[in-house]
Amino acid sequence: MTVPVASPAPRAADEGIPMGKDVGFHTRGITCGEALKRAFDISLALLLLALAAPILLLGALAVALDGKGPILYWQERVGREGAVFWICKLRTMRVDAESAGAPQWAALGDPRVTRVGRILRRLRIDELPQILNVLKGEMSLVGPRPERPFFVEYLARELPDYAARHAVRPGITGWAQVNYPYGASLEDARNKLSFDLYYIKHAGLLLDLLIVLVTPKAVVIDGGGR
């Protein structure tokens, strides 16, 4: 969902989502591979921020001209080891997107998406502010997409090993994102989980680099977000 909210301080780490049963993916200390991945994230994130700055500014201007409401919105997401953090995006939905109450996944042709928002989502330009989350260490460039606490609790009850996704930092793009279309159902979440678990078991700089390289194709040719 893309409802704009205020941006208060994140919850304490001990207020995160429980990891659930031990599924063999827990992290213990910082390994050499993790240090290399963090260096890869910071280096590429800084480069992407410099290259994407003009596109981000144009996107922000388009949101501002499209109607009333904030340009950015902040939303709680679940990160590594269940820690909850605030994700940043360009606003793509009406300010009353969740006035009905319960959170909802975005649907194909969702009427809550604005005219500009539809373009930003199609090209995933709305995701660019998350580069800041990467630099802060809350996210990685590559990893399972972070989900909202409401949906994490639901999916963890329905899908075995769902909590294993939280063994690594969530990503802006990922193995599931380049291999599976946008999902908005339990069945979609089940299918994407298999890709996320594959990524976690085979994670490395070469796989990360491959995912980064094929992401533009997934966005432009295969279709972006809803």
Image: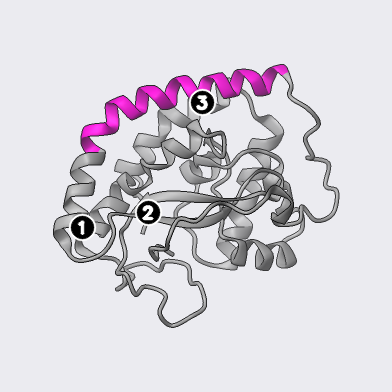
Number of other residues with Cα within 10 Å of mark 2, as a class: few under 14, some 14 to 19, many 20 or more: many
Which residue is more in the foreground, 165 or 159?
165
Question: What's the residue type where badge 1 is placed?
Answer: Val
Q: Position of residue 163 (x, y in %)?
A: 73, 52
> In the image, is residue 53 part of the stretch drawn in magenta?
yes
Whole-percent x and y of residue 215? 41, 36
Name the element at disc 1: helix
Residue sticking out furthest to the front: 9
Asked if residue 135 is positioned above or below residue 61 in the image, the reply reads above
Give residue 165's position: percent from left, percent from top: 67, 47
Horizontal and vertical percent position of residue 199: 63, 37
Contact check, label 2 and label 3, Cβ < 8 Å: no
Residue 21 in which image quadrant:
bottom right
Q: Which residue is mark 3?
A: 41
Q: Which residue is located at x 14 percent, y 57 percent? A: 65
Disc 1 packing (10 Å; few <14; some 14–19; many ≥20): some
Q: Nearer the viewer, mark 2 or mark 1?
A: 1
Label 3 SS: helix
